[in-house]
Amino acid sequence: QEDRDCQAPKNILLRPNQIRETVFPTILAFQMMRVGQLIVAAVPGEFTTMAGKVTREAIKAVLVERGMVNESATVVLNNVASGYAGYVTTFEEYQHQRYEGGFTTYGPYTHAAMTDILVQMAEDLADGKQSYPGIKPQLPNKAEEWEIKQLILDDPPIGGKFGDVKVDVSPGPHWPGDTVRCTLWGAHPRNHLQRNSSFGTVWRWQPTNE
């Protein structure tokens, strides 16, 4: 009954706390950074349009009030970063229990709780304080990684390998402001999570006099 009350008006089939950590995480990561008048808040869920608007405005209000940015500042929510906690709706959207509300895993106050965390982080950022780090999210083990992948076959082209150039950049010269394109043979990202690495890098060639 307690779980039903917590999730109401949602009709629940399974309790999140009875399902493994890889399905419904119990530890979530949040990040916030500023570059001039741009603030990026990384959140582990998919915010609806209205939920995102409310949260962005709350973050900006704190930073403007503290004098860190002005009214021209832009706050961006980077969704599904450092984890996945399902959808995040406003309290009012949750009451309708449409798709997004039904998949707001942690109940009707999910959005309010996450916004409170981000507002606190914004206050710490403006005050130059270190935010409380909390508990580090647990990375999946090898068996869980294999289950998450669920890929039977993902091969490069015959005679080729992942990373090969399929369509190269058109001959130059190219000037500042030009758009150049190339196509590479890439693997499915679930083949390797690339921890502490990247799925792709861009290098800038600088000629020397040597």
Image (spheres, helix red, strand yellow):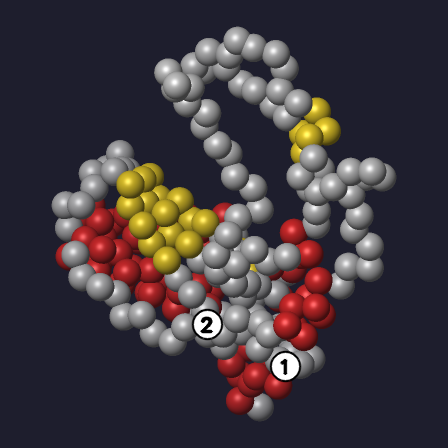
Q: Which labelled disc corresponds to residue 179?
A: none
Farthest bottom residue in view: 1
Farthest front residue in view: 210
| Residue 17, quarter of the rendered image | bottom right
Which percent across, then down, holds residue 166? 72, 29
Which percent across, then down, holds residue 154? 79, 51
Q: Which labelled disc corresponds to residue 19?
A: 1
Which percent across, then down, holds residue 190? 67, 56
Q: Measuring 70% from the left and 47% from the top, which residue is drawn there?
A: 187
Q: Measuring 57% from the left and 77% from the top, which residue is drawn there?
A: 21
Q: Residues within 10 Å of mark 2 (few under 14, many from 20)?
A: few
Q: Is residue 81 above or below residue 1?
A: above
Instruction: Read off the residue under disc 2.
Output: 137
What secondary structure is marked by label 2? Answer: loop
Q: Is residue 89 visible?
A: no
Position of 135 with respect to 4 (left or right) is left
Farthest right residue in view: 158
Figure quadrant of the N terminus: bottom right
Q: Is residue 120 visible?
A: yes
Identify the mark nearer the N-term, 2 or 1: 1
Position of 63 with respect to 74 (left or right) is left
Q: Measuring 41% from the left and 73% from the top, which residue is drawn there?
A: 136
Kindly report the distance in space between the C-alpha atoms of the residues bearing marks 2 and 1.
16 Å
Q: Amino acid at mark 2?
A: Pro
**Which of the pair 165/193 is nearer the observer?**
165
**Which of the pair 32/1 is nearer the observer?**
32
What secondary structure is marked by label 1? Answer: loop
Figure quadrant of the C terminus: top left
